[in-house]
Amino acid sequence: MSAQPVNVDFDPGLDPALDPDVTPPPTTASTGTPVLQARGLVKRYGQVTALDGADFELYPGEILAVIGDNGAGKSTLIKALSGAIVPDEGEILLDGQPVKFRSPLDARRLGIETVYQDLAVAPALDIAENLFLGREIRRPGPFGSVFRMVDKGRMLREAGGHMADLKIGIRSMRQAVETLSGGQRQGVAVARSAAFARHVVIMDEPTAALGVKESGMVLDLIRQVRDRGLPVILISHNMPHVFDVADRVHIQRLGRRIAVVEPRNFSMSDAVAIMTGAMAGERVARN
Ligand SMILES: Nc1ncnc2c1ncn2[C@@H]1O[C@H](COP(=O)(O)OP(=O)(O)O)[C@@H](O)[C@H]1O
Ligand SMILES: [Mg+2]
C-alpha cells in the first residue's frame, strides 16, 4: 500500500476489536446533510439476519456504489431504501428528516426512483408508453378526467425530450421496446427514472445483462444523471464498472457497512479484500 493516507471512512463501533484511538479521516465527498441516510437497519427473515445494523449515507451530487459478496445484504438494503421492504429496526432519513416507507409508492412519491435489475420495461409497449407507465398524462378537460383518455401527443413529445436530455439516440418514440437492443432498453429505464426522480435514482445491476459497448453507454447515462443533479446509488458486481464510475464505494459485509472508500485513492484489489473479509477495515483505517 502507498504511504499516503488512505481515504477510508471506516465505521467505528462495528468491530469490538477496533482501537478507539483510530479516528476515521473524513472523505472529501461526505460533507453537508446526506440526501438519503439510514442508521442501524435490521431486517430478519426467520433465522437469517439480512441486515444487522446497517448504516448508509448518500450525499448530494455523487454516484455511490454498493458492493458486497452474495448474501451481504445489498438487495435488502436497497429494498429498505426504496420502500420494497420495511426494516424491523433502524431509521431512514431523507434530507435529514425521518421517513417511513410502507411501499415503493411511498418512496416514489418522495422522489426516489429505482431501476430494477431485470430490465423493468414492458417489451410490447412503445418507448413513450414505457416512460409514462403508471403515470400517463391525461388529456385536458373531461376526455381526460372522466374518460381517462391519455394525451399521446404530449407523451410522445415529452418522451422525446427526456431521451434527448440523456443523449439517447433513438429517433422514434413509437418504436416498441422489444425492437431495441439491451443497452437501449436499459437506457429507456434509466431515462424514465431520471425523468421522474426528484431526489435519488437507485440502479440495481444496470449493466449485468449488457455487453461491453452497451455497458459503456449505460455508465455514461449514469454520469449524466449525476451531472444533472441527481445522486445515484449503483449496486454492481462489476468492479471495473464500479471503479470507473463511482465517487464513493459503500462496502457491505455480513449485513453491515464495514467501510466506505474512494476509488480515486483506493485500489480495486483492496476493496475486494475488505469485501471478502481478507482485509479488515481496521487495518485499512490504520494505514
Ligand atoms: N425474502 C427473503 N427470505 C428469506 N431470506 C432472505 C430474503 N431476502 C434475503 N434473504 C437472505 O438475507 C441475506 C441477504 O440477502 P440479500 O440482501 O439478497 O444479499 P445480496 O443482495 O448482498 O446478495 C441472504 O442470506 C439471503 O438469503
Ligand atoms: Mg442481491
Image (cartoon, grey):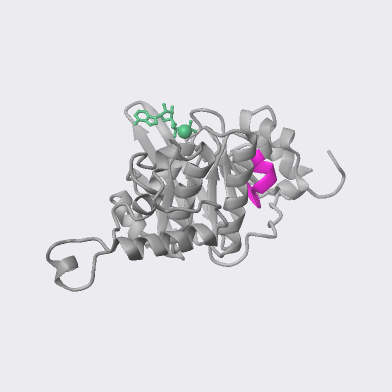
| Percent position of residue 141, x then y | 18, 73
Residue lying at the far left in this picture: please name it.
Answer: 146
| Percent position of residue 122, x then y | 35, 41
Residue beneath the point at 45% across and 37% down: 117
Note whether residue 11 is visible: no
Residue beneath the point at 46% across and 51% down: 39
Residue lying at the far bottom in this picture: please name it.
Answer: 141
Magenta-tinted stretch: 241-249
Q: Quadrant of residue 259?
A: top right
Quick one: 110 or 34, which is closer to the camera? 110
| Percent position of residue 203, x then y | 49, 45
On whether residue 194 falls in the magenta region, the answer is no
Residue lying at the far right in this picture: please name it.
Answer: 3
Image quarter of the C terminus? top right
| Percent position of residue 135, x then y | 30, 58
Residue beneath the point at 34% across and 31% down: 45
Quick one: 129 or 40, which is closer to the camera? 129
Residue beneath the point at 44% across and 39% down: 179
Report the number of numbered marks: 0
Note whether residue 214 is visible: yes
